[in-house]
Image (cartoon, grey):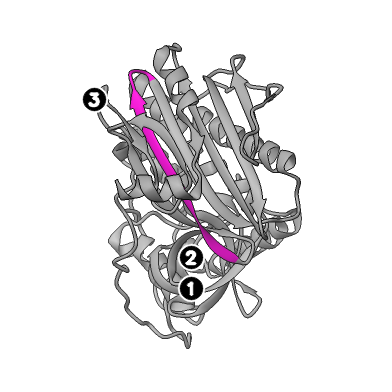
Amino acid sequence: MNMQKTFWATVALASFLFIAPRVSGASFVGKVIEVNEGDVITVSNMNRPVKVRLLGIDAPEMTQAFGDVAKQHLSDLVLDKLVMVQYAGYTKNYALQARVLIDGRDICAQMVRDGAAWFDPKSQVLSPDDGVIYLQSQLAAQNERRGIWQVQNPVSPWDFVKANKAQIAAPVVAAGSAPKRSASPGLTTEGLRWGNIATSRPASVNTANREEDYAAPASGQWRTLRPVGEKFSVLVPADGKSMAFPIPNGDRMINLNIYIGQQNLSVYQVMWFAGPSMGESDTNAIQGTIQGYLRGITSSYESRNGAGSFQCETPEPTSISMKGFTGLEFDFQGCTLTGVTRVFTKVVGDERRMYVFGVFYKQRDASVGKFLKSFEFLSAESATARNKN
């Protein structure tokens, strides 16, 4: 990946990650409508599909030995059932990282206990108690030679992926060494009472928002972004992408709306959402959003640049409040990626409205100032009139 595409993808990914601290540690209940892999499911919540990656575990890849069996086992456990999703953040692929429970039973630990997945010791979001339970579950599965442990030296998913990336042939399980059915069913469905109900991918699940889709060619043209139903406008690169993603916030789902576009080596982004107020002050809400955004930038940058580290301290903000909105500007001149981000927020009734727009660049040009100065809040009358045009 060249430097320009890396720069683009880093900022794009952080756009999705910045909100994670606002949803950390919460939960929701939904019905599992699809099992995507041995450690990924899709849950319907308030008629919206939410992709969930099971926290703290790693199942065999779908192209790896036992990948299809692990997926089937997870399907036997959860498909078409109501689950409690306790989420702790987001993955790089924009899925929620979460523990999944049925009637208080931890499905993540169950997959490890059944020999259908590995405990992931690199997980940074498990509690120490959870880590002990998952490790004990794996040791028990190994001792009983359940599932993946029925063969000698099974290849972990992270080693399998690493070998593929290095274009090295990963070890393959020989046909004669495949696990056999026994009194300990392991990855088979013997003795289980779970129904094997097939389901297709819901039409509403958007699989097009892949990382490479963000690298739209820059035409040099600009247009005014005035989302229907919103009371703001801003000039943006004309060839950008508009995206809306359902995310959990407290006990309900909200839409995170994003517009991201590129001009030369500059990445422009506008994000907005409305969700329940948690009683925090406007300033604290903005500071929390910026801290989460920086964590997203750091995680994305460092994962894409090997040993490279992202250096940044939150700059002292400048007040830019207007039209009843508390506003702060953050000038990231001392960071590895240079940029300016402005955040506006206020509470209307019991709902917090948040608007984040900014630009990261290799070299600041006149377009940066044009973008920043163009953002404005519209009156109800102006918004209605402009949306009709």
Give residue 150's position: percent from left, percent from top: 46, 65
**C-alpha gap between disc 2 and disc 3:** 49 Å
Question: Badges 1 and 3: C-beta atoms under 8 Å apart?
Answer: no
Circle 2 residue: 116
| Numbered badge on residue 219 | 3
What secondary structure prevails in the magenta region? strand
In this rendering, the label closer to the viewer, 2 or 3: 3
Which amino acid, by three-letter code, is at mark 3? Ser
Which amino acid, by three-letter code, is at mark 1? Gly
Check disc 1 and report its element: helix, strand or loop: loop
| Numbered badge on residue 325 | none
The answer to whether residue 156 is seen in the rendering is no
Check disc 2 and report its element: helix, strand or loop: loop
256 drawn magenta: yes
At a point 44% along the width and 72% down the height, the residue shown is 47
Specify which label sits upstream in the sequence, 2 or 1.
2
Q: Nearer the viewer, residue 198 or 94?
A: 94
Circle 1 residue: 186
Quadrant that contains the N terminus: top left
Question: Badges 2 and 1: C-beta atoms under 8 Å apart?
Answer: yes
Give residue 12's position: percent from left, percent from top: 43, 35
Range of the magenta residues? Answer: 252-265
Which amino acid, by three-letter code, is at mark 2? Ala
Task: Determine whether, in the image, residue 347 is placed left or right of residue 111.
Answer: right
Question: Badges 2 and 3: C-beta atoms under 8 Å apart?
Answer: no
In this rendering, the label closer to the viewer, 2 or 1: 2
Give residue 276's position: percent from left, percent from top: 64, 59
At a point 32% along the width and 78% down the height, the residue shown is 198
